[in-house]
Amino acid sequence: MNDSRHFLEQILNYRIFDFGEYELTVNKLITILIIILVTRVLLWLVKKTLNNARRFKTIEKGNLYSLIQIISYTVWVIAIIIILDTLGLKITVLLTGSAALLVGVGLGLQQTFNDFISGIILLLEGKTKVGDVLEVDGDVLMLKKIGLRTSEGINRDDIAVIIPNSKIINDKVINWSHQSRKTRFRINVGVAYGSDVDLVVKILEESALEHPAISDKESIEARFTDFGNSSLNFQLLFFSRNIFRIEKVKSDIRKIINRKFNETGITIPFPQMDVYLKSDK
């Protein structure tokens, strides 16, 4: 019995490698693996619990993602500190010994640190969440992931777009989903002079009413906006929840408008040019 215990102690205390005064033994390696396993199991339980809360609608999807990310980063930082302590590496000693190096690295990675801090702000603040529709530099995209340094979204062409977090925090970014899941959109159209204005307004409003993606049908409004150079200008305003694919909705409504104009004889003017030929004689 004593021989077996002594043999087990020898295995656990067996040095895998030495580095100065630090050593990695089988015992420490097993402890590190257990810490990693416990961390992963703990995060799995947290994620499952929060997903159950999501099913009961006690927490929004975007807030759920942010909360899981914050908890994950925090737990992993604690786990890494414990692992370093298990290896005999003191955090204070490491920070003191590498202070000059950290300053140099910090100066060279200012933008990276800026993005990192911006990622933490995004997760904690909660104003921009996963699933939100953003307009960044004129490109409309749906946010799919918020990371510590960068965020990822897909635009209306289903192309993945990687955005530095500092851009979302510091630049002017339009969040179409921030206040309401429905947004007001507009379609501009011009008709020939002499057209029946009341009939045009009626057709525009009826065209929007026909589309199933329109919300608050009572709020549909067509306006006579201006006298153009060659057309009477109108604007159709409507609300829709289909924010991300709104260009498809607008295209469908334009088709309906064009069909109704053809049926009623209303024409859309186009630029015309007179060409004069001058003879040398």
Image: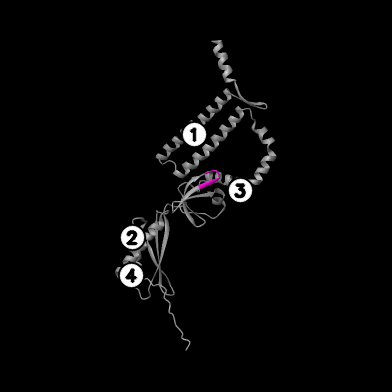
Q: Residues within 10 Å of mark 4 (few under 14, many from 20)?
A: few
* Residue highlighted by disc 3: 111
Q: Residues within 10 Å of mark 2 (few under 14, many from 20)?
A: some
How far separated are the C-alphas under marks 3 and 4?
A: 57 Å
Q: Tell which circle, 4 or 2, labels the residue nearer the N-terminal end.
A: 4
- Contact (Cβ within 8 Å) of mark 4 with mark 2: no
* Quarter of the rendering containing residue 5: top right
* Residue highlighted by disc 1: 43
The amino acid pointed to by label 1 is Leu
Nearer mark to the viewer, of 3 and 4? 3
- The residue range painted magenta reads 147-151
The amino acid pointed to by label 3 is Gln
How far separated are the C-alphas under marks 3 and 1?
A: 30 Å
How far separated are the C-alphas under marks 3 and 2?
A: 49 Å
* Residue highlighted by disc 4: 199
The amino acid pointed to by label 4 is Leu
Vertically, is 235 above or below 51? Answer: below
Q: Element type at marker 2?
A: helix
